[in-house]
Image (tube, coloured by chain):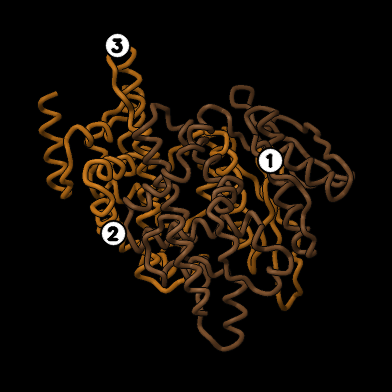
Chain colours: A brown, B orange
Amino acid sequence: MKEYYKKVQEFCKKNDLDIDTEWIFKALCHSSYANEVVRKGMNVESNERLEFLGDAVLALSLADLLYREYDVDEGVMSKTRAVVASEKVLAEVARNMNIGEYLLLGKGELKTGGRGRDSILADAFEAILGALYLSEGFEIARNFVKEKLGIYIEKALNKELVLDYKTTLQELTQGNLGVRPEYSYIENIGTPQNKLFHVEVRVNGKALAVGYGKTKKAAEQDAARKAYEKLLKDLEEQGIEPKNSERLT
Amino acid sequence: MKEYYKKVQEFCKKNDLDIDTEWIFKALCHSSYANEVVRKGMNVESNERLEFLGDAVLALSLADLLYREYDVDEGVMSKTRAVVASEKVLAEVARNMNIGEYLLLGKGELKTGGRGRDSILADAFEAILGALYLSEGFEIARNFVKEKLGIYIEKALNKELVLDYKTTLQELTQGNLGVRPEYSYIENIGTPQNKLFHVEVRVNGKALAVGYGKTKKAAEQDAARKAYEKLLKDLEEQGIEPKNSERLT
């Protein structure tokens, strides 16, 4: 454990995280590890509450940066933040920070490649942000967000960063099931003035998800995102390590 | 205009809002008023960007209070925040602050009772929070949230404050799609001793979600909540600011 403490201190130093070690320790503690330890009779809290807090720190930091530094309306602010705060972007940042190496994971997660999993990495990044906020206050946390994610805001506003879920889903189904998803347009469930398209996505003939959107393209993306998340969860529950290349276009 | 400035200063004083008048002015400026003025060739910004910012200030303030002051897990934190940050609660707080009286509204909104509308009041409250944050910083804004909403956190945790998702969903579908949701009871999938009702909610004839519960009412609320969250997420991802219709209580 002393060894681990030293490692974590190195991690903080490398990433300019001037933060109490106790906090960072909590942020790196995945629920799978906490559960294991609790079963042994010790009391350890997982990073889930810190992640909830950090998610809000991230949302306000990005809103602040978009408000002060960019002359864009609230619709663009909202979309841009959704892309920048997406699991893929946060996982990428977490990888650059080398967070995976320092995570405390349960045995099951360790075996199935938890250190490299997008969802675990993105959650840990948020938890670290929550820890930084509690330890050093909002200003410091916001500056950290700017340093790590400023470039992604620029990219998202320049349309160089779009979450393309159709491609992502296709890579997942081809990599794991050897097939491509099929989309079928169902109908417009809105009014002619206020359209809301409805699209279904099927894999191997089985309906996986339905999506809604103001345009058919948006409805397809919505359906693809839902199907992707569902399929990913199914695979993970079966203990299959999903094969796909992560795609941010 | 001089008269209005004086009134707004009184409003700030009464509500302990130590904040630059220029900011508060912006926060009270509804888009209907801004649009009217812009048509006359003047340049006025509505409170929509401030509202986006204020929404995030509110979310972090509540997450912070729940993290530090209550020993509840992230699921309870999330549910509690959703209730406290709901349109109904925020509109109630805005009414207690008498915000409606000071709002700048377009002629159409004035005629149709905009000063008393939940959605306009809740949005203005968030915009004021955004203004307070920009003018005085996060600490002051969080303390303001605690002062105004602390009692609602207590109530929500004590189950004295519950979101009526059927009403909330109806407001959302009427405001955005011009229709009301329909509920259909499917079956009891439990046993006679241990009932579990199963209800489907449809919008424009399309199934949006299914809900389960020990009673039909609980199953309806469950279905309404799922449909509401789904629809809201869909709208937000498309960058559409959800419109809630007026609710008569």
Q: Residue at x 32, y 60 (%)?
A: A136
- Whole-angstrom CA distance, mark 1 to mark 2, is 41 Å
Q: Amino acid at mark 2?
A: Lys
Q: Amino acid at mark 3?
A: Lys
Left or right placement of residue B146 versus residue B195 in this view: left
Upstream in sequence: badge 3 or badge 2: 3
x then y, percent, for residue A228: 73, 47
- Whole-angstrom CA distance, mark 3 to mark 2, is 40 Å
Left or right placement of residue A224 versus residue A57 in this view: right
User: Is there any visible trace of residue B169 in the rendered image?
Assistant: yes
Question: Marks 1 and 2: same chain?
Answer: no
Q: Nearer the viewer, residue A96 or B88?
A: A96
Q: Nearer the viewer, residue A145 or A169?
A: A145
Question: Marks 3 and 2: same chain?
Answer: yes
Q: Residue at x 18, y 42 (%)?
A: B19
Q: Which residue is mark 3?
A: B40
- Secondary structure under tag 1 reads loop
**Which numbered marker is on residue B146?**
2
| Pointer 3 chain | B
Q: Amino acid at mark 1?
A: Arg
Q: Which residue is mark 1?
A: A247
User: Is there any visible trace of residue B117 in the rendered image?
Assistant: no
- Whole-angstrom CA distance, mark 1 to mark 3, is 47 Å
